[in-house]
Each structure stands twice: as structure tokens, then as C-alpha cells.
Image (tube, grey):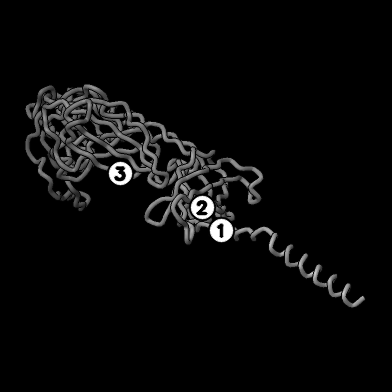
Amino acid sequence: MRARACCGLLSLVALVAAGACSSSPAAPAAVSTASPQLLSPGNGSQVANQSQPVTLVVQNAAGSKAGTTYTFEVASDVAFTAKVQTKDGILEGTGGQTSVKLDPLPAAKDYFWRARAQAPGGTGGFSDLFKFTVGPAVTLAAPAPISPLTNAETNPRPALRVTNASRSGSTGAITYKFEIARDAGFGSIVVSATTTEGVNETGYIPTSDLPTRSLLFWRASAIDAANALTSTPSTTQSFTPLPFSQAETVAQQLGVVLWPGRVPPGSVGHATMGDNWQVQTLHYLPRNVFFQSPDAEMIRIFDLLDRGFDPDAAAAWMNGNGYPTAALWYPPPEKGVIGLQYVYLASRNKVFVNGTWEVVLRLE
């Protein structure tokens, strides 16, 4: 009996040993792939719609090896159940970072993005998510030119004026770029300047004289720097600067714009400045008043005379076009003067067409 038990025990040990020898080898451990680190756009970033397409950038996964690729996902919800774009199989970039350019996304929306790495032998988990917001769509129409319009004749420092550009969306501060060139293609720029937006319209006056008696071209573009947006240029207009007229020369000395609003018709050459048009301080004795002569009203009246207006028509044009005046015309043969508050504009020899006009202090 004892011999049989011993033999049975030996047989059991042999079976266990045989079973141990015949078992298959253990499977190799799975390769662990780290998640990449999200870099740009940063969490909570605001992306201007005009700066699209958005580029996603990650720091390469730690310990990555040759052949690693990346998957980028963009969704409109944190659970990524509403994915809007997936970029897969993106080869790992050099310099420690990998990036991918998205297709344009709808404006004025929040988005969430994440990424993961796929190394040979293992796929890593997704990174934490980042949120970014694409701003609203912003549009800027071309400003419309007001003056000078094509074929105009101007002084050497004309006021270039445009209506403010119409817009949509949440724009930033708008500026305007004015360009003056010798050619309609703007290959030869004479002046380029930027100015802030005005009320309803925006203007620019060159700070130095433009070339006179030369055909020039101008245009203006609206700029929204905050949204990296520039409108198409205004319709190109042409003009020819002429030397300053007599009235414009005095206006320059006074530091005033001769015609800041509507500009009267006609061309100069019908009158001459005589005596006392130099800028000076005069004393009106009856009221003991000291005043500057000439002033803007006086030189505007003279400019109209120089353009061929008669005195009554000059006063009527000013009052009807935003330049109020109380000027009164006392025609010859008695006087031939235009009465103002403290002075007369006297026509020499009582001739007011192609005449010479002088500033005379009123005595009464």
C-alpha cells in the first residue's frame, strides 16, 4: 500500500512539472505613451475671426520616439460629443512642438480642443482640454470719397474727405489710411498717412505742400487694427494742386482752414488784395476794441470776390452754406465798400469786378 501511494505522489509531481514546462511565455507589457501638453491657443483665448484659420500647437509627448503621430480634436462641447474637426495622423514636429492648421470655424462661438500621441506600439490618452473663442464676424466697407473728386483743382494742401466706412460686428477703434500718388496704380506714393475716425466723415490735410500743377490720385482705406481688418480702398479720385490763392495764403498765416465745409465754385483771378491784408492788431476807437485783422470772415469774402462773385452774391452764398456773415454791400457811386463789424473792405476806384480790395478801419 505504501509503495502505491509513493508511486502516485511521484506521478502527480511529474504531471505538475510537465504542466509547468508546457505553459506559454508571458505577453510583453504594453508601451506607455504620454499625453502631449497643449500650448496654443491657450485656455480661455480670444481669437479674432479675421485671424483664422486657427493653428493648434502642442508640446511633444514626453519620451516620444521616431514615428510618433498626433490626433487633434475640436468640439463645441466639453464632452466632445459634438466634434467639429478631427486632424489625425499628424507627424511629430521638430523642435519639440507639433502643430496643425484647422479649417475655418464658424464665428462667434466657443470651442474646446485636445490632443493625443500615437507612438509605435502604443496610443496615449487625450490631454486635458483647452477652451478658445472665435470672435464675431466683422466687416468694413470701403469709405466713400467726398472731396476732392476727380479732375478737381485744389490748393497745395487740400482737405481729403471721406464718409466713414459702414461696418458690422463688434469693431475696434477705426482709423483711416490716406494715400496720394502720382499714378492711378499707386506705384509712386507721394503721401501716406493715418488718422483717427471723425464724426460721420473723416478727413486728412497734408502737412506740407503737394507738387503743384501735377495730376495726383488719392484713396482712403478703413482699418480695424484690433480685428486685423482693412477695408478695400475708396474709389480712386484725381486732382491737380495749384499754388495757394491770395486768401488761402492769409488763411495759412492765421492757422485756419479757408473752407472747412462746402467749397464755393469758380476759380480765382478776379480780385487783388491791396493794402492792410497783413495779419495785425487794430484798435476800433469808438468802442475801444482791439481786434485781429483780417479774420476768417474777411478772407472768405475776399476769396468769393476773387472767384468772380459780386459782393451781394458773396454774402448770400456764405449765409446759405454754413458761413454766416453780416456783411453789407454799399455799391458805387457813393461808396463801393463792404461793411463789416469794425472795418470796410473797400474797392479801389469803386471797381469790384477784377478790382483791388483794401482793408479800411471804420471811423463811425
Q: Position of residue 351 (x, y in %)?
A: 10, 24
363 displayed left or right of 111 = left
Q: Residues within 10 Å of mark 3 (few under 14, many from 20)?
A: some
What amino acid is found at the position of numbered circle 3 in the picture?
Answer: Thr
Q: Judge whether residue 363 can be spotted in this image.
A: no
Decide: is 45 above or below 107: below
- Labels 1 and 2 touching (C-beta < 8 A): yes
Q: Which residue is mark 1?
A: 31
* Residue 152 image position (x, y, % from top left): 21, 24
Q: Check residue 332 in the rendering and tell me which mark sits there, or answer none.
A: none
User: Would you call the spot at circle 1 few (<14 residues within 10 Å), some (14-19), or many (20 or more)?
Assistant: few
The residue at the far right in this view is 1
Nearer-N-terminus badge (1/2): 1
- Is residue 161 visible to the viewer in this orientation of the structure? yes
The amino acid type found where label 2 is placed reads Ala
Q: Amino acid at mark 1?
A: Val
Q: Quadrant of residue 363?
A: top left
Residue highlighted by disc 3 = 195
Residue at the spot of label 2? 119
Check contact, mark 1 vs mark 3: CB within 8 A: no
